[in-house]
Amino acid sequence: MDQALVVPDREDFIATKGKQKKQLKCDADSIAGCVSQRACVYCGARVVLNPVTDAVHLVHGPIGCSTYTWDIRGSLSSGSEMYRNSFSTDLKEQDIIFGGEKKLLACIDELVQKYQPPLIFVYSTCIIGVIGDDLKSICKQASKQYGIEILPVESSGFIGNKSAGYRAACDTLLHLIDLGKESLHQVSSQRQAAKQINYLGDFNLSGEAWIIKGYLERMGVKINVAFTGDSDSQHIKKAPDVDLNIIQCAGSMHYLAEKLEELYHIPYLQVSFLGLQDTANSLRNIAAMLQDETVAAKAEQLIAEESAKVKPDIDFYRSKLVGKKAAIYVGGGFKAISLIKQFREIGIDVVMIGTQTGRQEEYETIDTLVDDGTVILDDANPAELEKFMIEQEAHILVGGVKERPLAFKLGKAFIDHNHNRKHPLSGYVGAVNFAREVYTTVCSPVWKYLSK
C-alpha cells in the first residue's frame, strides 16, 4: 500500500477481497488528521429530520452550520413547505463569550409569532457543546409557553461522528412519538382493514416514497407514515399504530426500528427498493412478514407486470455497458450492497466500494458479493478514493456531492446518489432512471476528448 497516500493508521479500514484474511475495521471515529468524507454529527441529525415538512428547523450555532445544510434533502412534500426554510440563531463572538440562550429564546419567540408552527426542532452544533447552553431547559420553557412541541436535537459535533447524529435524530423522533401516546387508542379504533406499515429511512427524494407507496397500495398495504419523507408531526405521532416497520436506510433508522419494537412491539424488516432484484425481494418479504396470501399474490402480479415493462430498457442499457467497471462510495452499507447488485443487472462490475457509516455485518455481506481484487474501504478520504479509482481503472464513481469534483478531476463519469439529488432511483422506474443515467454518463463522447 502506498504510504505516501494512505495514512498508516488507516490500513485496518481498507481491504482487498482475496488478498487479506483480516476483518475490516469500521463503525469507529475518523483517524485524527485525515480529511474524512463523512459529514458531522449535526449534519447527520439534520438530514434525517429535515424532511419533516411542517417543522421549523432552527439551528443554534454559527450561520455556516445552517447554510451547510439548508434544503439538504431533495425531498418533496404533499403538504407544508415549511421545511424548505432554514433558521439560525447566527451566534457571534459576543454570544459565544456570554452565552446564546437569550438569543435562542428570542428566535423561538419570533418564529412562533411569524409562522405558528406545530413543531420546532432546535439543533445544537459544535459551539453549543463547547459553551454549554441548556437547550433542554429552553425548549421545555418555550414549549410550555406556546403550547407546541419544541424539541432539542442533541447533535453537538464533539459527541461522535455522523452516525451519532442519526441516533440523536431518532431519539428526538421517539420523544415526539411518545408525546402522541394519548391519541393512540383513538387511532387504533379507526384503523382500516388494509394492512398498515411505517416506511423508515425513506426521505421522499424526488417523490420516491410516493413510488413505493403506489406499489404497496396495489398489494393492499397502506403506509401509515414515511420516516421522514413527506411526514408531518401528527402522522409521526401515530407511528406505533401499525403491523410492521420496513427500513430502507439502515444506517439512519435501524436504531429507531429497534426501539419501536422494544417499546411498541412492532416487528421490522430491512428492505431495499434500489434495483430490480432488491425491489422484487423486498415486496415479497413484506408480503411474507404480513402473513397475508392475498397480499402475496398481488405482490407477484405487480412484480411480473413491472418487470415486463422495464425489461426492454434494461436490456438495451446492459448491451451498451457490459464490461465497464464501477467504484462506489456512499453513506450507508445497505445502499452499497444494493448498488453492487444493481450494477450487475446492467453488466457492470464493482471494483472499489466504500461507505461512510457501514456496519460490520454489512461489510461481511459486501465481501461475499464482490469479486476477488475488489477494494473495500470504510470512512475513506479523497486521497484514498483517488488512488484506488485509478489503480482499479474504474470508469464511473457513484457517490455524493463531495465525491463529484474528485471524479471529474480524474476524468471519470459520476452518478449522484446523494440525498440532495432531484431524480428518483427507487423501484422499477428508478432502476430505468439509474441505468439511463449510467449509460449517458459513461458513454458520453466527452471522455474521448479529455483523454487526448
Image: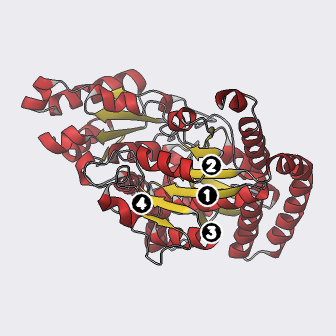
Number of numbered discs on residues: 4
- The disc labelled 1 sits on which kind of residue? Val
Of circles 1 and 3, the one toward us is 1
Residue 371: name its quadrant: bottom right
Which one is in front in this view, the residue at disc 3 or the one at disc 2? 2
Left or right position of 86 against 228 = left
Residue 210 placement, left or right of 101: right
Q: Are marks 2 and 1 in contact (CB under 8 Å)?
A: yes
Residue indicated by mark 1: 351
Mark 4 → mark 2, Cα distance in angstroms: 18 Å
Task: Give the amino acid type for the residue marked by disc 2 in the picture.
Answer: Ala
Residue 38 at x, y percent in the picture = 40, 48
| Quadrant in the picture for the N terminus | bottom left
Closer to us: mark 4 or mark 3?
A: 4
Coordinates of residue 391 in the picture (x, y in percent): 55, 52
Which of labels 4 and 1 is toward the front? 4
Q: Residues within 10 Å of mark 2 (few under 14, many from 20)?
A: many
Real-space CA distance between mark 1 and mark 3, rounded to the nearest whole angstrom: 40 Å
Tell me the tag on residue 394. 2
Comes first in the chain, label 4 or label 2: 4
- Of mark 4 and mark 3, the one earlier in the sequence is 4
Disc on the earlier residue, 3 or 2: 3
Q: Secondary structure at mark 4?
A: loop
Numbered tag placed on residue 302 in the rendering:
none
Residue at the image point whose x is 7% and y is 30% from the top: 97
Q: Where is the C terminus found, in terms of image quarters?
A: top right
Q: Is residue 427 above or below residue 264?
A: above
Residue 243 is tagged as 3
Secondary element under disc 1, as helix, strand or loop, is strand
Q: Can I make out residue 96 in this image? A: yes
Residue 290 percent coordinates (x, y):
70, 73
